[in-house]
Image (spheres, helix red, strand yellow):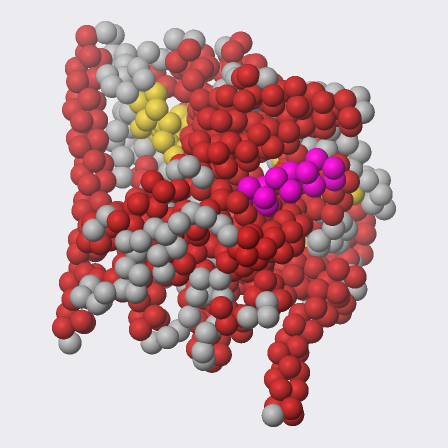
Amino acid sequence: MGAIDGILTGFEVAFSWQGIMFVLLGVFVGTFIGMLPGLGPISAIAIMIPITYGMDPSLALVMMAGVYYGAVFGGSTSSILLNAPGISGTVASSFDGYPMAQQGKAGKALAIAAISSFAGGTISVILLMIFAPMLASVAVSFGPPAYFALMLLGLTAISSLSEGSTIKALISAVVGFMIATIGIDPQTGTARFTFDSANLLDGIDFLVIALGLFAIAEVCYLVMNRHKSMGGSGKDIGSLKITKDDAKEMSGPIGRHSILGFILGILPGAGATIASFISYITEKRMSKNPEEFGKGSIKGLAAPETSNNAATSGAFVPLLSLGIPGSGTTAVMLGAFLVLGLQPGPMLMGDRPEVFWGIIASMYIGNVFLLILNLPLIPYIARILTIPRPMLISLVLMFSLIGVYAISFSVFDLYLLVAFGVLGYLMRMFAFPAPPFILAFILGGMMEQSFRQSMTISNGQLSIFFESNIALSLIALSVLSFAFPIVKNLRGKKKA
Amino acid sequence: MKKILALTMFAMLVLFLAACGGDDSSEEGNTDSESEGNGSEEASGDSGDSNGAWTPSESIEIVAPAGAGGGWDTTARMAAQTMTEEGIIEQDMGVVNKEGAGGAIGWAYMAEKAGSNHNLFVSSSPILLVPLNGQSEYGHEDFTPIANVIAGYGAFAVAKDAKWDNLNELFEDMKEDPQSVTVVGTSSPGSMDHIQFVRFAKAAGVDITKIKYVSAPDAGGVTQVLNGSADVYSTGVSEIAEQVRADKLRVLAVTSEERLDGEVLSTFPTAKEQGIDETFVNWRGFFGPNDMDPAAVKFYEKKFKELSDSEAFADIRANYGWNEMYMGSEEYKEFLDKEKQNLKEILDELGLTK
């Protein structure tokens, strides 16, 4: 069967009435779970596995895929309104989304997020459909040295994530790195910094840190400053309307980050979280007004929102075309394949075209549903902000605690959440920026592992980083991106 | 000052909330074990009535010491489902995931259930290896082995165009220069993927202390062998079967005694037929807590045998690529003791025991 026939079969599955129903169900559950801070697609899909046993595999998987990208779509809502990331992929969306909501433009922020998500999702599905079979080789082209170089490139952005003191940003990043080393070290099997506590053997979950540093710290801040009136006070939702100028501002980042996010999504291990951060940073670097970022920039919201949705589609490339899961969520989906009696792997496209193409085709419908589902709801959802502040704060606190508890049903994680909340508040009081901390934590673990994998493979020869073309070009980019601000600075001084 | 006071109060409030959660769950645990205590009394009452046979008097909880969707979870769910559907056990069977620390969190939870007759859990080789690595207080000695049910086998795969045609050629190269070959697996050194390879290398006479092993989580092992970063992928048979069918990887050897069944699987040579006398089985079975009533052990042992012999479970085995491997409680315990001794020797030689 040729690819065209396959695609047609896929559309038949996706556009059958059962197909449409299951997509709708999937994206509805996904977007709802995504909105609740802490609850993510992994647990939702895991819960669904026993239910789908015996179902038509393509319909079951169409629904699970819907939960996955639906959660990424909906995850931005609580990032924007409450500074409490719904899922890990939407942490970067709060950098500019939350300030926007604080300025009384919550409606607009949510609309921008919804439209960017839709565009990122849809453009990347088109890319997925055209290139999925060919991109399989891209997904496996990154060896450990290339991953190390990619993480290095991401880290050069720490300086651009900081406001004010670079030293404070670096301190913040180093602490993030240190936290990333907690747990069993995969390369030696040794427990590091666990203090003989079994609770720390798996390291600290990203969401514990994200919710602590953002949501709980924000709650502390609001409680401490409860007598001050806060700027736009959040009571005002503002208009949903996106003006022509806004649309113009969004179009650049949407185009760029649909592609960048998709490519980063393809790489196993990178995923939506890393993609959204890298897109945010890239956009800030490219911007003529980088000082607007972090204060409610439209570009700063559109870039990560486009990117995380595009990366989600990208993550289906290694899963569907190679049977390689690149993230926790896709690993659970791989388990679902097996439960449904399918063998995910390079033969899936030929053996079961209705599954392979059905999932991809259903994403078009899914993204349209998500837009229809989310846009009219914005005024109602945004009204969360009109809840009296004491109640709102309690709600955020409650949802953060529930969300963290749901990760692994561990009470210990709740203590950690509180500890990181207090740390986040202290960092804020003393003007240590949190984003470099988060970035170093995400990239640090992978960077260390890929560095040490490279070292083992090369018997300790550093030259391994200069042998692969991918690694070499990424390292060159890192050096450039490090040198660029310095050169710019020197030039500026000369002129002055 | 006022601010700091307020902050402290706030922190205390949150801690209080969190602690409440903690109390709740531990209370829940207590009531559970209390009711179980009652249950077993009742049950022993029952046993007096009917020729000393024990039967469960309440629902049975099966713990999968890992997240949903993995091997332990699937085994627990499929066993519970089949036993209910086939009417092997009439009481409700619920599967609970106690995820974390490679199983240690789940085992610690089960250790608290000592004496209960209504709590089971599923485990495999990690319950021997993780305690040897010093990462779990509890090992198989702290529980009651009930029955082994299934087996999986490992495989050593290389890229399609690799220079080795069989396991001996690989080991010959490694004997000359162990550092010239990189082995990749999913889990860390001292765990299954690593140890299964080491066992065969040792049998072939390779210096096992010099083997280069890289751990690549998130299925990075396939990627690394496909792009040539690593040479040999040590993993489970089912993880690579599709890659072999797609002609991307080749299998140098499976760790089973005899060739496996299946269109693709039967093409994998065993190490034995290549003259390396070693096997490795990833057994998987069910355990009860310490001090389980011997009558209850007898009961479950018999039920798992029925499960293992049922046609419904045979279909499930075929579906997941599992192999049949039943062992009753006594035999299982002996097997585990021997296997642990065996693994300990290897880990000692590698300097990985704590």
Whether residue B99 can be seen here: no
Above or below, A427 relative to B246 = below
Please give the name of the residue rendered at 25% of the width and 19% of the height, measured from the top-left corner: B58
Q: Position of residue B216 (x, y in %)?
A: 61, 50
Please give the name of the residue rendered at 66% of the width and 70% of the height, measured from the top-left corner: A478
Please give the name of the residue rendered at 81% of the width and 40% of the height, measured from the top-left corner: B160
Observer-nearest of A214 and B81: A214
Residue B241 falls in image quadrant: top right
Would you say residue A404 sits in the magenta stretch? no
Whether residue B41 can be seen here: yes
Q: Position of residue B316 (x, y in %)?
A: 55, 18
Q: Main secondary structure of the magenta part?
A: helix
Please give the count of numbered marks on the rendered protein: 0
Q: Residue furthest front?
A: A244
Q: Position of residue A211 (x, y in %)?
A: 36, 54
Q: Quadrant of the C terminus of chain A?
A: bottom right
Please give the name of the residue rendered at 66% of the width and 78% of the height, measured from the top-left corner: A483
Observer-nearest of B298 and A327: A327
Q: Position of residue B49 (x, y in %)?
A: 19, 8
Would you say residue A121 sits in the magenta stretch? yes
Q: Quadrant of the N terminus of chain A?
A: top right
Left or right of B316, for residue B20 = left
Left or right of B339, for residue B19 = left
Above or below, B197 relative to B181 = above
Q: Which residues are magenta?
A: A117-131
Above or below, B223 relative to B75 = below
